[in-house]
């Protein structure tokens, strides 16, 4: 701080005194402090004619008067009378040393006025009142012996600015709101010490108990100061050890697994976030220990004490629990009483599901009460009085249980309150409630309403509908306080594959358009061989009725390619343009039905220069696709087709939210092409997913799907499938395999100049064309892992998965196998170049009549692979991350089972952002 700091706190420390650290100011008393202390003892000397000034330089002491002579006959032992305090009158009050405050203000703070009588006590109180204002660093009062009082003050400085130095883990915006000192305020030592304590408390909450804060001031002109808080943050205080004393049945290690807190260290210790000391977590661990023992039959267990000791180096903590396990109990007699006619004793006992002789388990009792509350709620009893009663038999170590169901009135919904929604309209939330105001209460419908609101995806996770008593005992108020989250999404997806190279997808969507719950989306996809754009709109409650209505327009430009040498050549192009409408309605609470109509025009073409004979039309025959160049399977696809498709779907969904933890979702759909147009087929698909949560953050899901497409028209010819390339299935997308990496495909290998087939895995010598299939299936098992609170707070959800599936069923195309082509070479008019014309397959090229001969061009061989129903299998791990850039999914997968021709991929990712 330079020279200015030398005039601050540190510079004013008296020699030989130690600086106070870690929570106190480095301040030493000035000489005026000793004068003030002397004055407090000398203020009483104004009595009895003393001429000593208060808190000023002492005058010569007056000689005491001789004691009066004793009167004759007086009792020598009689006590002398106490002399009353001497009162004087204030003649004048002068103020010295003030810079900012007016003299009248200081006199008012002292409560002294001319003409007022005073004693030592009055002047002493005046000093206290002036110091109580915290405006002064020093105050003295002189002139008490004459009545001409002089109040000398030294004003506290004014704060110019607050400076934080050394804070890295806690930024200024976290610390500044906790500091009470502020610019243009009066500086006091007590306020500075209080701010130090507040800053230290912030660091303790972060687990940094070794933090120190040293306040200093920098003297400025005009009695101003800069206040500097020098901060040493220190390291996080780790939990070095957790010890348990008194445990006999369970080891320390077993009990540590039940705690939230973990010991520091280990191979993966750097990944832990719960190995720092937290007093709140310490209290929670005691409850966790008790809950664990209560599930094991130890009803008398208690934590005698829990002590957290900071190590001498102030870096770590050692936590010690002293426990008493007590005896282990079994369930004795199981009884029940019920005052509700709808919930008889037999029903209560069957719901409890606890048997005599089982080890006592408080969790089983808690679950039984929860189940009974749900059952009573389904019968209309919102506030059922259900309580377990225990009768402990210590002699026989038995715990007798009686479940009591008290009398409770059946209630009705008085009101539904919705708060917190600023964008979403009330009606969007209310239409998801399964009961209305005035209906009989039903806990099952309340839970379903909660799941439906959560499934909208508009609000925070773990949304809860709360129940409160209404205006009468038989009335209940349902309230939901929502916290809206971004419902728009700007997505950016990227990837890399050997077929598509770099793939980029840009999309924008709004799932709560104008707060009405409507969906509006648009996307653009681009890769080395594919470009597409689409826009769509869906209203799930058309005209405020439970009828879904939506539409979509799209265009896709797909270009396939292969390599000849190092040159990339486009093989075929497909341009699809169309649109569609869809509608749907619910058939029951969990079932819904939907229909759709789509009209699509597809145009498939090949590059004439590369794959046509006589592309310029100069020969005797019109340009025609040459199967020797393109392959028959591509030549057969050329043309323009119109598809008029109508489809139906039925959906079952009883999952509990946008990220399900329980329930199942199933879809069965059928599409029929042939209502007009020139394409005829029927296609069916089915998929089902089951979710199961196991508590603690473990979520298991099982998914299966499959599809088949059957032609309703005959095959165009030998080696041609009746289902066009553009209508076939190209899924499923198995992690661990490339995009379109499985299923029937054509591999084209090149021959060298000597007629040898080049089968090395080189894109320059091998061309792969995915043909799709008419049938597919896929299964997936995935387990989502629990994470620490720190990882959950940043949105990390890791999982492990197994994918299995296949794509198959396709008519084998006619394949080409030609070792070489012998073509005539014709000299043009300039004689400077040659034109290669098509010729027949030969092994050698002999000389012929004429000025020019023939040249030999290497051929190729086509191989049909991948048309097998045998499963492809992959296993891997992945993570979903709600990143600052939006939802991100990263997968690492290894293909364990594959078929000839399959293409694998180890890494994939997807990222988007919400707004």
Image: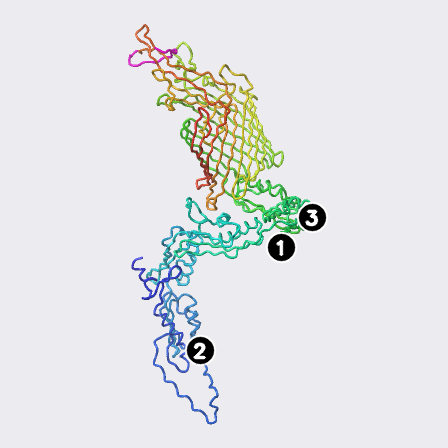
Q: Which residue is mark 1?
A: 395
Judged from this view, the residue extending furthest toward the top is 849
Q: Is residue 303 magenta?
A: no
Q: Nearer the viewer, residue 223 or 406?
A: 406
Question: Magenta part mainly helix, strand or loop?
Answer: loop
Q: Nearer the viewer, mark 3 or mark 2?
A: 3
Labels 2 and 1 touching (C-beta < 8 A): no
Q: How crowded is the residue under tag 1: few (<14 C-alpha within 10 Å), some, or many (20+)?
A: few
| The image quarter in which residue 101 lies | bottom left
Q: Position of residue 806 (x, y in %)?
A: 50, 27
- Segment tinted magenta in the rendering: 829-844
* Horizontal and vertical percent position of residue 526: 43, 30
Estimate how packed mark 2 is, as few (under 14), some (14 to 19) or many (20 or more) residues with alpha carbons within 10 Å. some
Q: Secondary structure at mark 2?
A: strand
Q: Earlier in the sequence, mark 3 or mark 2?
A: 2
**Residue position for label 2:** 117
Instruction: Tell me if residue 841 is in the magenta stretch.
Output: yes
> How far apart are the two marked residues, 3 and 1, measured between alpha carbons?
35 Å
Seen in the picture, residue 609 relative to 136 is either above or below; the reply is above
Task: Answer with left or right where residue 7 lies relative to residue 768.
Answer: left
Q: Quadrant of the N terminus?
A: bottom left
Which numbered disc flags the more N-terminal residue, 3 or 1?
Answer: 3
Judged from this view, the residue extending furthest toward the right is 341
How far apart in space, not on screen, are marks 2 and 1 (Cα)?
82 Å
Number of numbered discs: 3
Q: Say few, some or many: other residues with alpha carbon within 10 Å of mark 3 (under 14 / 14 to 19 / 20 or more).
A: some
Q: Residue furthest bottom?
A: 72
Instruction: Work out how far the residue at label 3 is from the one at label 2, CA to CA, in angstroms.
Output: 82 Å
Front residue of 569/783: it is 783
Disc 3 + disc 1, Cβ < 8 Å: no
Which SS class for mark 1? loop
Pinpoint residue 695: horizontal percent, then vertical percent.
54, 43
């Amino acid at each position: 701080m330079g020279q200015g700091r030398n005039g601050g706190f540190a510079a004013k420390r008296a020699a030989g005194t130690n600086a106070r650290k870690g929570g106190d100011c480095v301040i030493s008393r000035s000489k005026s402090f000793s004068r003030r202390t002397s004055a407090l003892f000398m203020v009483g000397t104004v009595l009895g004619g003393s001429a000593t000034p208060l808190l000023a330089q002492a005058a010569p002491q007056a000689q005491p008067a001789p004691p009066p002579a004793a009167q004759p006959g007086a009792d020598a032992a009689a006590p002398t009378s106490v002399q009353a305090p001497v009162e004087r009158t204030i003649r004048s009050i002068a103020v010295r040393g003030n810079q900012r405050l007016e003299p009248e203000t200081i006199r008012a703070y002292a409560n002294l006025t001319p003409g007022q009588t005073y004693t030592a006590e009055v002047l002493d109180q005046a000093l206290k009142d002036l110091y109580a204002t915290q405006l002064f660093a020093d105050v003295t009062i002189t002139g008490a012996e004459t009545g001409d009082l002089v109040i000398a003050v030294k004003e506290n400085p004014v704060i110019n600015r607050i400076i934080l130095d050394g804070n890295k883990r806690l930024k200024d915006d976290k610390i500044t709101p906790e500091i009470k000192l502020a610019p243009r305020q009066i500086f006091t030592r007590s306020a500075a010490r209080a701010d130090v304590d507040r800053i230290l408390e912030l660091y303790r909450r972060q687990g940094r108990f070794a933090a120190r804060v040293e306040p200093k001031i920098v003297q400025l002109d005009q009695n101003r100061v800069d206040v500097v808080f020098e901060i040493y943050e220190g390291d996080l205080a780790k939990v070095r050890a957790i010890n348990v004393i008194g445990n006999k049945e369970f080891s320390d290690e077993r009990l540590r697994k039940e705690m939230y807190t973990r010991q520091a260290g280990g191979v993966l210790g750097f990944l832990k976030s719960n190995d720092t000391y937290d007093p709140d977590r310490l209290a929670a661990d005691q409850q966790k220990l008790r809950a664990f023992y209560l599930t094991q039959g130890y009803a008398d267990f208690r934590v005698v004490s829990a002590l957290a000791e900071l190590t001498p180096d102030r870096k770590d903590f050692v936590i010690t629990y002293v426990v008493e396990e007590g005896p282990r109990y079994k369930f004795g007699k199981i009884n029940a009483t019920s005052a509700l006619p709808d919930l008889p004793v037999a029903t209560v006992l069957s719901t409890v599901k606890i048997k005599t002789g089982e080890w006592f388990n408080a969790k089983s009792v808690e679950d039984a009460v929860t189940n009974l509350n749900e059952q009573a709620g389904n019968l209309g009893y919102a506030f059922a009085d259900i309580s377990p009663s225990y009768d402990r038999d210590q002699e026989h170590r038995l715990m007798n249980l009686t479940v009591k169901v008290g009398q409770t009135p059946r209630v009705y919904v008085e009101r539904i309150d919705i708060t917190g929604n600023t964008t979403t309209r009330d009606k969007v939330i209310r239409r998801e409630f399964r009961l209305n105001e005035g209906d009989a209460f039903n806990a099952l419908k309340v839970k379903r309403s909660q799941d439906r609101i959560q499934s909208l995806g508009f609000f925070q996770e773990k949304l809860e509908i709360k129940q409160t008593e209404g205006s009468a005992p038989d009335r209940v108020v349902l309230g939901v306080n929502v916290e809206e989250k971004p419902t728009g999404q700007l997505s950016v997806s990227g990837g890399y594959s050997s077929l598509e190279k770099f793939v980029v997808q840009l999309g924008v969507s709004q799932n709560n358009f104008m707060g009405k719950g409507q969906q509006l989306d648009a996307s653009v996809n681009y890769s080395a061989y594919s470009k597409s754009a689409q826009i769509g709109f869906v209203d799930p409650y058309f005209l405020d009725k439970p009828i879904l209505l939506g539409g979509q327009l799209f265009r896709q430009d797909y270009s396939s390619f292969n390599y000849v040498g190092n040159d990339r050549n486009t093989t075929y192009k497909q341009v699809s343009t169309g649109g569609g409408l869809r509608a749907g309605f619910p058939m029951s609470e969990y079932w819904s039905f939907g229909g759709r109509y789509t009209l699509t025009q597809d145009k498939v073409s090949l590059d004439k220069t590369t794959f046509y004979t006589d592309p310029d039309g100069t020969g005797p025959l019109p340009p025609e696709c040459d199967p020797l160049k393109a392959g028959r399977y591509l030549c057969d696809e050329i043309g323009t087709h119109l598809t008029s498709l109508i489809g139906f779907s039925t959906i079952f969904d009883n999952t509990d939210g946008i990220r399900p933890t329980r329930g199942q979702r199933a879809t069965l759909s059928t599409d029929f092409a042939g209502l007009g147009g020139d394409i005829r087929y029927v296609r069916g698909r089915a998929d089902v997913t089951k979710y199961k949560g196991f508590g603690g953050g473990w979520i298991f899901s099982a998914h299966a799907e499959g599809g088949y497409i059957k032609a309703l028209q005959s095959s165009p010819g030998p080696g041609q499938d009746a289902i066009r390339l553009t209508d076939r299935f190209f899924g499923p997308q198995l992690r661990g395999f490339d995009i379109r990496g499985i299923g029937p495909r054509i591999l084209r290998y090149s021959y060298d100049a000597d007629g040898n087939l080049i089968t090395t895995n080189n894109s320059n010598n091998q061309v792969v064309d995915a043909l799709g299939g008419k049938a597919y299936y896929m299964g997936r098992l995935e387990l989502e892992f629990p994470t620490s609170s720190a990882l959950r707070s940043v949105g990390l959800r890791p999982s492990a998965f197994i994918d299995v599936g296949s794509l198959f069923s396709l008519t084998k195309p006619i394949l080409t196998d030609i070792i070489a082509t012998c073509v005539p070479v014709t000299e043009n008019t300039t004689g400077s170049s040659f034109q290669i014309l098509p010729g027949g397959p030969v092994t050698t090229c002999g000389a012929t009549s004429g000025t020019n001969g023939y040249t030999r061009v290497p051929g190729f061989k086509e191989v049909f692979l991948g048309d097998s129903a045998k499963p492809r299998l992959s296993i891997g791990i992945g993570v979903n991350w709600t990143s600052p850039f939006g939802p991100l999914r990263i997968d690492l997968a290894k293909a364990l089972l594959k078929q000839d021709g399959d293409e694998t991929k180890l890494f994939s990712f997807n990222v988007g952002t919400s707004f």
